[in-house]
Each structure stands twice: as structure tokens, then as C-alpha cells.
Amino acid sequence: MRRILTIFLLFLAVNGFAQTFKSGLLLGVSAAQVEGDGYGGYNKVGAILGGFTNTEFSKKISLQFEIAYIGKGARKVPKPDKGDLRSFNLRLNYIEIPLALRYHFKKFHFELGLYYGYLLNVYAEDQFGEIDFQNQPFPFKNHDFGGLIGLQYEFIHNWFFNVRSKNSLIPTRDFNNLDQNIGILNKAFNRGWYNVDLNFTIRYQFGAKN
């Protein structure tokens, strides 16, 4: 963790020494689910808080590095009026480091990249009480690695709205895929559990705009 924080502070400090690097802060929310847990829908809301720095390779292409706290997980709300008493609440909190290649078109940035996440803590409960996943045979892994695609729009000078879709590329938990509506290949390989989330953030970039 100290190494991650040190890297982040160094990247922010670069903005004060080189005009080719621009840094800023981001704040937002995630809507998340876990592919494989048997529950569908982006029903788990989490906070996103962090910072970024970027550099331009040309007027059209730039690379952005970020580090942020993000809440992920899954949620199933019971519906007693319909006879459904099942509930599920899973909180997965990460320190996440995305790296995105961006294409600029007017005030829009189109993003494609990868991310790495380090798991801080896990909490889960269902209708029967708390679930201690980390002391079971198939705990959540400490590391999450995935891909992202996004779109960013500058709505005011140096203020941006960003939306992203992200998906784990490797299982975050090596357990049976419990989803009913999955493809034939997923059923055949029984791939495990994956993080899937949508991110909505407001970003402020210091200094001159891109």
C-alpha cells in the first residue's frame, strides 16, 4: 500500500515540474455486480475517490494513469410481497489503478485500457446473516485485473464527466458460476466470479486544459 501511495504522489508531483503532464482529482459512484454469483443487475452502489495524471503523445492521443478507492460488489433485495425472501449484500473495497489510452475528438475523450485492483476488505451477508468468504475454501483473491472502455466529456473548462464500463479478465473468486443466463462456453468452463461495474465520475484537471 505504501508503494502505491508513493507512486500516486510522484505522479501528481510531476505536474509541477513538467508541462507535458497534467494532473487532477476525481469523485463519483460505481454501479456494480458480480458475474457468477447467481444475482443479476448493477444493484451495488459504491464510492469512487482518487486522482489522475496524463500526458499527450499528440493532439489526438494521450495516456492517463489513475489511482482511486472504489467500492464494488453485488446486492439482492428481498421482495416479501412476491414471496422472495432471499437477500444478498456483498461489499468489495479496492485500491484501483487504471491505465487508459485516450483518443481526443473536440471535447470528447474515447478511452480504452486496463486496470489493476488490490482488495482492501470484504463484507457479505444474506438472509441468514454474515458470510465469512475469506475463511472458506474459495475466498476472494487479493488482486483484480481487467479491461475498461470509457467516454469523457469536458462540460466546463477543466471540468469533465466520465463514464466507464469495466470487467474483470481473470476470476476474482474461483467458485462455481451460479448464473443461469450464461453462454455455453461459460457453462463448460465454469469460469468463477468476476467484477463488472459501471463508473460515473466528475473530474477536475489542474492548470491549462488539453
Image: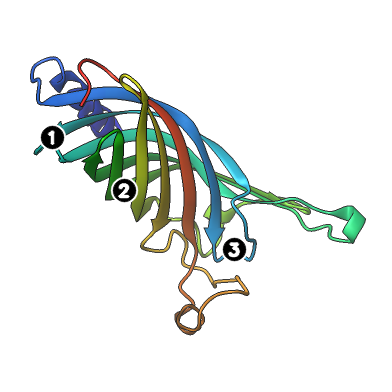
Give the quadrant of the N terminus.
Answer: top left
Sequence-wise, the earlier of marks 2 and 3 is 3
Residue 139: percent from left, percent from top: 50, 58
Q: Is residue 36 above or below residue 81?
A: below
Tell me where residue 178 sits by quadrant: bottom right
Residue type pointed to by label 1: Glu
- Residue, disc 1: 56
Look at the image and tell me in which quarter the C terminus lies: top left
Residue 202 on image: x %, y %: 43, 28
Asked whether, in this view, residue 11 is left or right of residue 149, the answer is left
Marks 2, 3: nearer the viewer = 2
Mark 3 surroundings: few (<14), some (14-19) or many (≥20) residues within 10 A: some
Instruction: Name the residue carrying label 3.
Output: 37
* Residue that mark 2 sits on: 115
* Viewer-proximal residue among 144 and 183: 183
Q: Are marks 2 and 1 in contact (CB under 8 Å)?
A: no
Residue 92 visible from this viewpoint? no
Measured as percent of width and height from the top left, residue 136 is found at: 56, 60
Q: How far apart are the alpha carbons under marks 3 and 1?
A: 40 Å
Secondary structure of the residue carrying numbered label 3? loop
Give the Cα separation between the discs numbered 2 and 3: 22 Å
Q: Is residue 171 visible?
A: yes
Q: Amino acid at mark 3?
A: Asp
